[in-house]
Amino acid sequence: MTEKINEDPSNGLPFDDTTDFEEVRRGFIATMPDGVIRDAGGRPVWDMAQYSFISPDAAAPETVHPSLWRQAQLNMNHGLFKVVDRVYQVRGYDLSNVSFIEGETGYIVIDPLISAETAKAALDLVYEKLGKKPIKAVIYTHSHVDHFGGVKGIVSEDDVKSGKIRIVAPVGFMDAAVSENVTAGNAMSRRATYMYGSLLPKGPLGQVDAGLGKTTSSGTVTLLAPTETITETGQEMIIDGVKIVFQNTPGAEAPAEMCFYFPQFRALCMAEITACTMHNILTLRGAQVRDARIWGYYIQQALDLFGETTDVVFTSHHWPRWGKERITNYLKKQRDLYTYIHDQTLRLINHGYTSIEIAEMLELPESLATEWFNRGYYGTLNHNVKAVYQKYIGWFDGNPANLHPLPPEEAGRKYVELAGGPAAMLDKARDAYKKGEYRWVAQLVSHLVFADPKNREARELEADALEQLGYQAENAVWRNFYLTGAMELRKGVVEAASPQSAGKDLVKSLTLDMIFDYLAVRLNGPKAAGKTIALKINFTDTKETYLLSLENSVLHHHAGERPEKPDAVISISRSALEGILLGQSTFVDKAASGELKIDGDVTKIGELFSLMDTFPFWFNIVTP
């Protein structure tokens, strides 16, 4: 069935249009010879060589959707590219692009990738081919880690603090950048191993792409706080002789984001508001749902502000577009993509349909669906419809039968019993598999796996079904989810190098209120029942005072002096607390070194922190 589906998936798609293949190579200057970037210890943090099976003229394998294969071929192009005079990009050195603007005396850098190692490699290539000049400024387009994480690979904290280098970001950047990676960061990072297929082997049977780029780098994530903030659309700035006009676009693709225009170069940077794929209104790794309505509005606003005088559009992913006609078509149809999904989902909501029903009903009009840049390589129409539904209606579909459903393990046992037992359920599922009903097989057998996770036959059959669904998927993220699920059903959860959702620079950037909010999330409420604890914390370096109080199984924090009498007073530096949070030391260590002083009931501190959960990273997803 998969082979038959993948033989003729085009549905009118213009496979004979090779314009993207011409534009993705336009302006190519040079690249790294082996495609590998390593950290200081020699470990590869980025490796394009492992994708050597994706050649530019190879037909799609039977196990990869031809449309996704086309995107994977396009995303193989890597190196330094000239966009227009004085505007350059390094692409294919990470999931995102890093752009370099030549000012009068140095470079303006836009979006320094995920990792310090990949950002440094990109800068080294620029220095080698364009000449070594000082970096005058770094611009973060938005608050996702692939647009700031490599900053310390190209600039130093001292140079930023001294004012030698400016860092420009949209309003709300720091709150958005750090909170997403901390409060729910553990679960998001675990799900991201599914989303990007980081555990999968690279090849026609495994990971081939991430839709937005090849994959994510695995180097050192860093962060430097902005020195200047863009607060409104129309705000202008001159950096090293280059005029920039900004457009603030919060709440669409990211909580804090901005696009901007370079009048001297007639070049428009659309950040990640547009891309060469349908984007996510709700990313499958997990995040707050995005606003499809305002997303379309911002693209129209960019057209109104800059469309008449723009000769090239470049973005933080994929490749640019040149020429007014091509740019206008691109921006209008990306605008209408998100607006159509928003408006038509709401239309069907008001007809009484549920999210699952609407996702099965809705199709894009041909004028939108046949544009390659609107295909669902990263987001999909199916899960974006559900995201719009979630934003307006929430998780509940209105059917009281779904108001309080049984948890998966209990429901699984009852489904197995209803089917006549495990053997009967497997027989029915095998018959469905032979008919190519892979969605039903996965849904059916998942009940048996949750009822009895040791049932090897059930795990193998569900894995077989997920594998076929992965091979059929046009969407890179869906493929990665399906194939990672299949792998873990067969092999179990295999722990690999664990990515840090809250690294050193992110923890340093947290406000104290954010830190205490996170501690409140870690508090095990049932274990804390009936306990009351009050701790006063004096920060010796910042001269701030906080009261931590536990009551009613809730941990509260209050800044400043309070009338409540604490059980103990803790004196500690902010930096010492960061070391404890990062797992580099403990309260006992800090007390022994003299960095921590306690007056009062010492046992209350140990009691409070004994009530804190430590979150396991490698939790189960496809099994109980």
Image: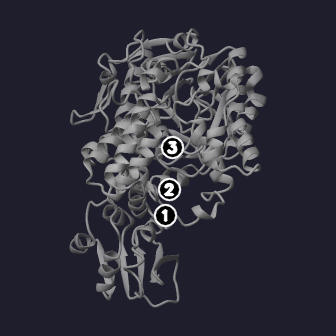
Q: Mark 1: give few (<14), some (14-19) or many (20+) Cα within 10 Å.
A: some
Q: Is residue 181 visible?
A: yes
The residue carrying pointer 2 sits among few (fewer than 14), some (14 to 19) or many (20 or more) residues within 10 Å by Cα, namely many
Q: Earlier in the sequence, mark 3 or mark 1?
A: 3
Q: Amino acid at mark 2?
A: Ser
Percent across and percent down for residue 92 are 42, 24
Helix or strand or loop: what does disc 1 sit on? helix
Task: Residue 537: give x, y in percent of width and height.
Answer: 41, 77
Q: Is residue 96 above or below residue 86?
A: below
Cα distance between the residues tagged 3 and 1: 18 Å
What's the residue type where badge 3 is placed? His
Q: Residue at x 44, y 61 (%)?
A: 411
Which residue occupies 64% across, 21% down?
A: 370
Q: Residue at x 40, y 58 (%)?
A: 412
The total of numbered circles placed on residues is 3
Is residue 274 or residue 102 the one in the foreground? 274
- Label 3 sits on a secondary structure element that is loop
Observer-nearest of 408 and 188? 408
- What residue sits right under mark 2 in the picture? 179
Residue at image point 48% right, 65% down: 406
Tell me, for residue 514, which label it has, or none: 1
> Vertically, is 603 above or below 352?
below
First-in-chain label (3 vs 2): 3
Q: Which residue is mark 3?
A: 144
Mark 1 is on which residue type? Answer: Met
> Decide: marks 2, 1 in contact (CB < 8 A)?
yes
